Image: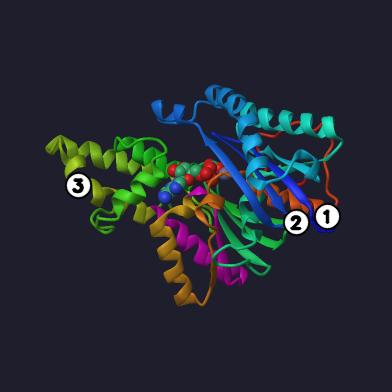
Amino acid sequence: MNKVSDIYILGIESSCDDTSIAVCRNNTVLSNVTANQKVHSLYGGVVPELASRAHQEHIVPVYQQALKDANVTLDDIDAIAYTHGPGLLGSLLVGCSFAKSLAMATGKKLIAINHMEAHILAHTAANNPDGNPQYPYLNLTVSGGHTQLVRVNNPSSFDLIGESIDDAAGEAFDKGAKTLGLPYPGGPHVDKIAKTGNPLAYKFPISNVGEFEFSFSGVKTSLLYFLQKETKNDPDFISNNLADICASYQHIIVQSLLQKVEYTADALNLSTICLSGGVSANSYLNQSIRELGTKKGWNIFIPPLNLCTDNGAMIALAGYQKYLQNDFSTIDASPKSRWKPGVSL
Ligand code: KG4
Ligand code: ZN
């Protein structure tokens, strides 16, 4: 029997290349079903037109599986949350239209979610191994499209402190991996190969930018020039030294992230530090931030892997917070390709 106070939220995520739908009961994730799009690996990056088509193909079966896994029917759902932005417009339109159709057909409430806020609200899930952080905290969101430092005051108040002025950290991993001939998305491959390499074997530069900003386009270019130079002397340089190259490249990206986190945490006097987004799955970043946290006396929170990468559960969790605030959206709202956290619809 459902408790009268229980709220069931359907969460629909389609901002990039994963179609993911989840059901949450309050902050408990009951199901979280994701269809990955393999097609993009052929092109070494996401092809927007193909992503929209794949969402169209996947969205109904993923929705059906999400209800089934949660052991609920549409009747049980109290509100429908969907990613309203930021992301690829064609991809967002698929999830948005599907959510609106469900809301219109059932008369249920519709909740428009900011994808970057949802990455952060993955920290509100019940049963996360690190538990749930106390507010306020500093969140480093590191994904394929964004690198952001956000002061989180409460589940509906976000101050964007700084972000990358060019490539995102995930993009630096993926583009570097592509240069090394690794498949897309390259981040997990670099992570795995780097495990047997020496992070100090080669030195790549960190770009010097504003105090709360990041820049990752320089490191990607320095890898390219370094490889061009070395392969002139030794055509097998990459294959002979792949683990050391991956470890050194990963090291500089992680150092750059940690330097800014430490500086920002000190400047804002925050000691609860949270990671979110796909790159938080990186094992070297995980280990390094926990080591730094021990030295600094921080409380560190990293969500489980399935709540770090793009997923419907984080949309449902964000939807639950908005439901509690009575913050619903209208049927005529149109998705936004750009949308910073903390900015209202
Ligand atoms: O958050 P996410 O799933 O999607 C976006 O919103 O962008 O993040 C995807 C990014 C990709 O760039 C991917 O290479 C990176 O997360 N990523 C990793 C790892 N796992 C995923 N990067 C480094 N190490 C990993 N283990
Ligand atoms: Zn994301």
Q: Secondary structure at mark 3?
A: helix
Q: CA distance from mark 1 to mark 2?
A: 9 Å
As for residue 1 lying within the magenta part, the answer is no
- Give the main secondary structure of the magenta stretch: helix
**Where's residue 91, x and y in %?**
62, 29
**Which residue, given by chain and number where applicable, does mark 1 sit on?**
325
Q: Nearer the viewer, mark 1 or mark 2?
A: 1
**Which residue, given by chain and number where applicable, does mark 2 sit on?**
156
Circle 3: is it few (<14), some (14-19), or many (20+) Cα within 10 Å? few
Residue 165 appears in view: no
Occupied quadrant, residue 176: top left
Q: Are marks 1 and 2 in contact (CB under 8 Å)?
A: yes
Q: Secondary structure at mark 2?
A: loop
**Where's residue 244, x and y in %?**
24, 52
The boundaries of the magenta stretch are 253-278
Residue occupying the point 64% across, 61% down: 126
